[in-house]
Image (cartoon, rainbow, N blue to C red):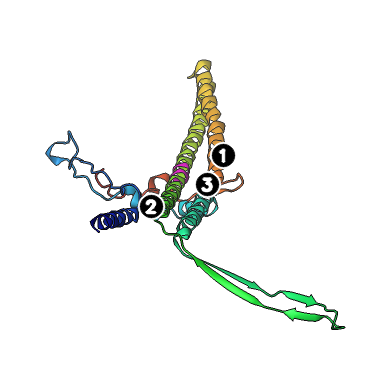
């Protein structure tokens, strides 16, 4: 009897071990990070768990027009739509991976209709025999392959969600950066146009001095050169403005066109207190 008991105990132990999933569970490795930055002395700021990326973009960019552009980009950008579609795909894969762990029920309903004829009866007999049945099946996840597949599908879902957040953050950063570059180009164009106006006045002044005999023709040519140089920079800045506007409309999923301006450049960013790290 003892050999049978020993064999039974071994089988029970193997069955209990087989009910667990194959392979060890994932454990995040410990990372030893210093508590302060090197080289900053005693006044080194302590690293904080708070991140600038966790702040709401509406609180970082107070310009209403810029906020409207960001909302339009988040609603219409096709890269973000692709990321959202991948999340739905990952959710479907997670549902498919979990499906084998649940029991399946199959049902069959039949209603055969037969006609029999006999030599003794002049009329055929119509026979209607409804039949129904069902079956229940469930596969035991003995080695844990379905549980590991569910964990893998869940990890893919979390990765897809994080990828969508990354696309959102990149999109907000690109729209805001392009808009701030556009406002900087607007300021540069304004300065260039004021420079052209001042060069025109200088040229008129030099011509008046030439007529009065207190200036030479060389001074007039120098003033004309400065005016032409300032005038030549204006079309280049206008071209850069149009290119930046087209880039913003591309991020918004719209046709090329002008972009509505809001606050001036020096009032664009409400810089918050950045945490260390």
> Disc 1 to disc 3, how far (Cα)?
23 Å
The percent coordinates of residue 6 (x first, y second) are 25, 55
User: In terms of sequence position, does the residue under pointer 1 or pointer 3 come before the other?
Assistant: 3
Query: Is 16 one of the magenta-colored residues?
Result: no
User: In terms of sequence position, does the residue under pointer 2 or pointer 3 come before the other?
Assistant: 3
Give the secondary structure at mark 3. Answer: helix
Residue at the farthest front position: 1
7 and 160: which is toward the camera:
7
Q: Residue at x 51, y 16 (%)?
A: 218
Q: Which mark is residue 79?
A: 3
Q: Which segment did they paint magenta? A: 173-178
The percent coordinates of residue 61 (x first, y second) are 40, 51
Quarter of the image with the N terminus is: bottom left
270 and 36: which is toward the camera:
36
The percent coordinates of residue 274 (x first, y second) are 28, 47
Q: Residues within 10 Å of mark 2 (few under 14, many from 20)?
A: some
Residue topped by disc 2? 143
152 and 175: which is toward the camera:
152
């Amino acid at each position: 009897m003892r050999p049978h008991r020993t064999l039974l105990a071994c089988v029970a132990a193997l069955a209990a071990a087989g009910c667990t999933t194959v392979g060890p569970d994932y454990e995040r490795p410990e990372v030893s990070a210093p508590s302060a930055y090197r080289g900053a002395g005693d006044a080194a700021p302590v690293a904080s768990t708070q991140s600038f990326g966790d702040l709401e973009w509406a609180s970082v960019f107070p310009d209403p027009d810029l906020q409207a552009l960001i909302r339009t980009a988040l609603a219409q950008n096709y890269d973000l739509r692709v990321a959202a579609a991948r999340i739905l795909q990952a959710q479907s894969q997670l549902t498919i991976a979990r499906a084998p762990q649940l029991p399946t029920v199959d049902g069959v309903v039949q209603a055969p209709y037969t006609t029999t004829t006999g030599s003794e009866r002049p009329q055929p007999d119509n026979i209607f025999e409804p039949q129904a049945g069902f079956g229940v099946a469930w596969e035991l996840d003995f080695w844990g392959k379905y549980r590991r597949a569910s964990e893998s599908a869940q990890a893919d879902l979390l990765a897809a969600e994080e990828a969508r957040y990354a696309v959102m953050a990149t999109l907000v950063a690109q729209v805001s950066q392009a808009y701030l570059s556009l406002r900087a180009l607007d300021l540069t164009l304004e300065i260039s146009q004021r420079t052209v106006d001042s060069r025109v006045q200088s040229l008129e002044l030099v011509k008046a001095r030439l007529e009065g005999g207190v200036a030479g023709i060389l001074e007039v040519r120098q003033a004309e050169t400065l005016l032409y140089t300032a005038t030549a920079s204006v079309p280049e800045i206008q071209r850069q403005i149009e290119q930046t506007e087209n880039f913003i409309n591309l991020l918004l999923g719209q046709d090329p066109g002008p972009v509505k301006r809001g606050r001036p450049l020096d009032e664009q960013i409400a810089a918050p207190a950045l945490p260390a790290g």
